[in-house]
Image (cartoon, helix red, strand yellow):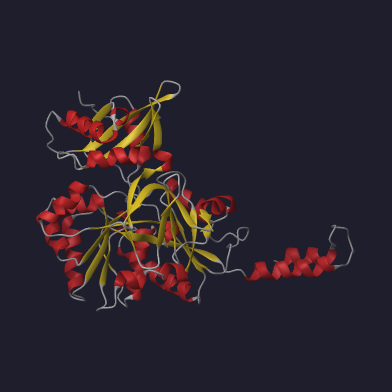
Amino acid sequence: MPGIRDRGRALGNDGRQGVAGPSVHAMNAIASTLDAMRPLRRTPVPPGPPGLTALIGPVAAALDGSGPAVAPVPTTSVTVSGDYVAGILRALRPDDPDAPLESEEVAVVLATSGSTGAPRGVLLTASALAALTESVNGTGPAPQWIAALPLSSMGGFNVLLRGLAAGREPIAISSLGGASPFTPLDFQRAVHAAAAHSSDIRVSLVAAQVRRLLSDEAGIEALSGCNQILVGAGPLPASLQESAGTHGIRLTRTYGATETSGGCVYDGEPLPGVGIVTLPTGEVVISGPMLALGYRLDRVLTESRFAESGYRTGDLGSIESGRLTLHGRIDDVVVVNGVNVALGAVEKVIDACPDVESGVALALPLGEAEVEIVALVLAAGAGPGLREQINAAVQGALGRPAVPRRVAVVPDFPLLPNRKIDRASLRALATEPGSVTWLP
């Protein structure tokens, strides 16, 4: 940065013209450091298989150190809005000379989902991203991964990493990243293509995709051909697991975050090298070699979330015999009639109701200082007693204050481009008069 060097030669420590001293050397050292900082390059990720092609080269170079750090950013499309992309760019700040990378160790900066607020850029090193790959891929024949989640999100990006580590590029479904609607036939074609390369077929999905696949014979056949089906980016309803089980299909529930390089706890058990503890408040803390360095351009948040004990997830949980059970998020705990209610716990009970496919619990304002809990559920073909069924189950498990005051059946949940549930849109739906029909 010539400006800093010039200023260092002309100015002394107190900024007066022509004053010599150690400050000249110090300023030149700072300038050299900034000049040598690893650049962060925006890597556009178009929808469909071209997105995979666009990422492979830059990511491989970023990981082995021969190229700049990469910031995968989706391109605008029918499913990815310009506002969504703009939010990611504000968080990542790629190609910005005024915002150098925090560390030369950073290889990738990924955006969080933004499902609980504005997206944040997460600083990931090559060693962190590779820390759990062997545990997941195993030591047997190289698996063939199928890319079915957006590659600019952690779940999809991990599939790319594990495919490269196995020496096999992932096979992308044609609808990848919202290029077209996700269909069982699309997924089936990808599984058949994968079978030509390996007998060990792996895929990472979200619950909504699994639900769609289980509703169709082609989807069931394709899932049955997969050796490992990871399901993350949110809760996995018990009813969905049971439905898969009736077809002999095993789903692996994953838990993690962009800050932990993706899923690091499988079916409640941490992968080798991963530590999990809970604080007295019930907050889950994760430690291990896969942790990110922190957040892009946010030292305060980095210091508050990345403590000596590990990454503070903001999730509530309990550990029994080494197995983690989640109870919701700290910021999802609301007070109803003086009683703390975890919305995540309410959702878990609703999901277990026989006639419910999946449910979302929301806290809506009620007067100046009160809130009411409402539930939006997927329940195709449910009978007239659905609300009573939900209310009885929630009251029996969590007490009267946790019972939703209103329940509505919706045809589907809106999703963010990374396939997580768009809770902001659901909240708007629930508060807009006439948008949903509340059950009597």
Q: Nearer the viewer, residue 269 or 4?
A: 269
Q: Seen in the image, is 361 located left or right of residue 13?
A: left
Q: Nearer the viewer, residue 110 or 174?
A: 110
As drawn, 409 above or below 140: above
Residue 203 picture location, percent across and down: 25, 63
Q: Nearer the viewer, residue 5 or 356?
A: 356
Q: Nearer the viewer, residue 250 or 433?
A: 250
Q: Residue at x 41, y 71 (%)?
A: 130
Residue 69 picture location, percent across and down: 51, 67
Q: Residue at x 20, y 30 (%)?
A: 392
- Any part of residue 151 in sight: no
Q: Residue at x 41, y 73 (%)?
A: 57
Q: Quadrant of residue 288?
A: bottom left
Return the residue found at the far front: 321
As drawn, 71 above or below 367: below
* Quadrant housing the C terminus: top left
- Any part of residue 300 in sight: yes
